[in-house]
Image (cartoon, rainbow, N blue to C red):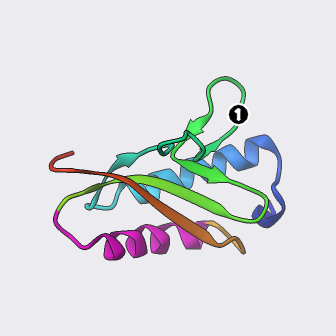
Amino acid sequence: MSAGRGGTMSERVGLAERIAAAVTALPDVAGLTAGPHGRVVTYRVGAPYAGVAVREREVEVGVVARRGRPLAEIAEAVRAAALPLAGDLPVDVLIADITETG
């Protein structure tokens, strides 16, 4: 798939799932979120895949961070986990919430 050009619905969902797996494996990420306005999603048949938006010109990842580490460091770790999978697309990170546990 040429991730930078959208790809098929199936390719976008597959990419979103791979990025989600890499990001949620990080110790400072408690989970994914579609964000306060529900815009960090990849559309598919049925309910949208929430927490990773694979778009034509970018990937956006919405996370709930675990408290403790500076948020800028968590965002950079999320970006670093997603970039190798995103191909030529830039990765934007939204930290939508912080939790004590997770």
- Identify the residue at the far top of this view: 46
Between 79 and 18, the residue placed more toward the observer is: 79
> Which quadrant of the view contains residue 25?
bottom left
What secondary structure prevails in the magenta region?
A: helix
Q: Is residue 26 left or right of residue 89?
A: left
Q: Position of residue 31 (x, y in %)?
A: 35, 47
Q: Is residue 11 left or right of residue 30?
A: right
The magenta stretch spans residue 26: no
Residue at label 1? 44
Between 95 and 81, the residue placed more toward the observer is: 95
- Identify the residue at the far front of this view: 37
Task: Give the residue at x 33% y 61%.
Answer: 26
The vertical placement of 21 against 43, above or below, is below
Query: Which range of residues does the magenta coloring cover?
Result: 68-85
The vertical placement of 80 against 43, above or below, is below
Task: Give the residue at x 21% y 45%.
Answer: 102
Q: Is residue 52 left or right of residue 65?
A: right
Q: Position of residue 16 (x, y in %)?
A: 60, 50
